[in-house]
Image (cartoon, rainbow, N blue to C red):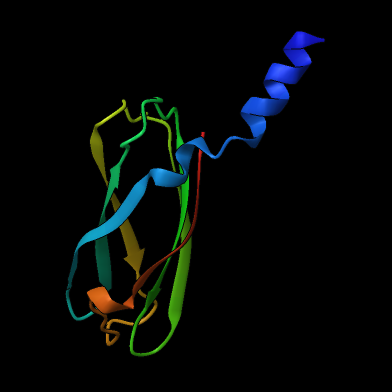
């Protein structure tokens, strides 16, 4: 019975609410036929608990459309550390353009 109570308490504790996700950089690259944008995310774990993995959903708005993706990362983040994740969006059209203001973190889940 005690084990059930401990698990219930742990499940209700918002341990990872303090994790900070920052869009650190954005750059476009390509040629006349293909274009893409690369986002660098910074994820900081200020909690005393190690993070085993993350799922982060992002969007990128270009001048023509919006792209969406979810990134899964299982490298882990030790307490007090910061990791960086590169996310690439390949555009449908080589004429599309975007900048860092078009990047949004839609949601995240840490475990």
Please tell me in which quadrant of the rendered image residue 1 appears. top right
Residue at the location (32% across, 37% down)?
45
Left or right position of 32 against 14: left
**Residue lying at the far right of the rendered structure:** 1
**Position of 29 relative to 107 (above/below):** below
**82 vs 7: above or below:** below
Asked if residue 19 lies left or right of residue 37, the reply is right
The x and y percentages for residue 79 are 31, 27
Which residue sits at x=30%, y=85%?
96
How many numbered marks have been drawn onto this rendered protein structure? 0
**Residue 23 rendering spot, x and y as whole percentages:** 26, 61
Residue 22 is left or right of residue 111, and the answer is left
Q: Nearer the viewer, residue 68 or 81?
A: 81
Q: Residue 19's spot in the image, x, y percent?
A: 38, 44
Residue 52 higher or lower than 18, as above or below = above
What's the residue at 26%, 31% (across, down)?
80
Residue 47: quadrant of the picture: top left
Residue 92, given in percent of the width and then of the height, sits at: 39, 77
């Amino acid at each position: 019975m005690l084990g059930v109570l401990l698990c219930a308490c742990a499940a209700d504790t918002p341990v990872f609410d303090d994790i900070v996700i920052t869009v650190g950089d954005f750059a476009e690259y390509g040629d006349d036929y293909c274009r893409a944008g690369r986002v660098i995310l910074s994820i900081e774990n200020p909690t005393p608990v190690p993070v085993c993995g993350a799922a982060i959903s992002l969007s990128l708005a270009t001048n023509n459309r919006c792209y969406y993706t979810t990134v899964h990362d299982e490298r882990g983040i030790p307490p007090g550390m910061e990791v960086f994740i590169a996310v690439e969006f390949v555009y449908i059209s080589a004429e599309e353009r975007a900048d860092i203001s078009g990047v949004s973190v839609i949601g995240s889940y840490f475990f």
